[in-house]
Image: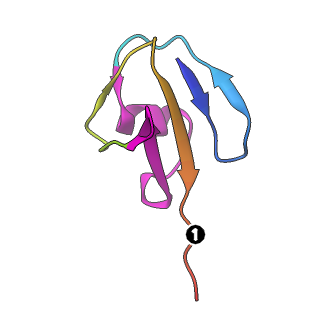
């Protein structure tokens, strides 16, 4: 699986099948601070990811 991290770096991971929530836990990223997209579409934390997927994790910015 290719994962584009909020830092802009891309990481190759061989994780089998897991949920977005499990991926974020594995990467030590708080799910309340990011959005995850696959194929240009935001996906929920219970979506199943596979090794062939390419996902992007985008940092959500709060403030005013």
Can you tell which quarter of the image residue 43 is in?
top left
Q: Residue furthest front?
A: 40
Q: Is residue 50 left or right of residue 6?
A: left
Q: Residues within 10 Å of mark 1 (few under 14, many from 20)?
A: few
Who's the residue at 47% across and 14% down the image? 15
Residue 5: x and y, percent? 64, 39
Q: Tell me if residue 7 comes above or below residue 47 in the rendering.
A: below
Magenta span includes 21: yes
How are the residues colored? rainbow
Foreground of the two, 28 or 19: 19
What residue is pinned by disc 1? 61
Q: Is residue 61 left or right of residue 10?
A: left
Which quadrant would the C terminus be assigned to in this image?
bottom right
Residue 44: x and y, percent? 29, 44
Foreground of the two, 44 or 30: 44
Q: How many marks?
A: 1
The local secondary structure at tag 1 comes to: loop
The span shown in magenta is 18-41
Q: Is residue 62 left or right of residue 7?
A: left
Q: Tell me if residue 62 comes above or below residue 50 in the rendering.
A: below
Who's the residue at 49% across and 54% down the image? 34
Can you tell which quarter of the image residue 39 is in?
top left
Who's the residue at 57% across and 17% down the image? 13
Magenta span includes 1: no
Who's the residue at 66% across and 25% down the image? 11
Q: Is residue 15 left or right of residue 17?
A: right
Residue 49: x and y, percent? 36, 23
Residue 47: x and y, percent? 28, 33
Q: Residue furthest left?
A: 46
Q: Tell me if residue 2 comes above or below residue 19 in the rendering.
A: above
């Amino acid at each position: 699986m290719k994962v584009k991290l909020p830092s802009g770096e891309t990481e190759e991971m061989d994780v089998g099948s897991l949920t977005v929530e499990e991926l974020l836990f594995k990467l030590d990223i708080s799910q309340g601070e990011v959005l995850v997209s696959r194929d240009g579409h935001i996906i929920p934390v219970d979506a199943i990811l596979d090794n062939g997927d390419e996902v992007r994790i985008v940092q959500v910015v709060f403030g005013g």
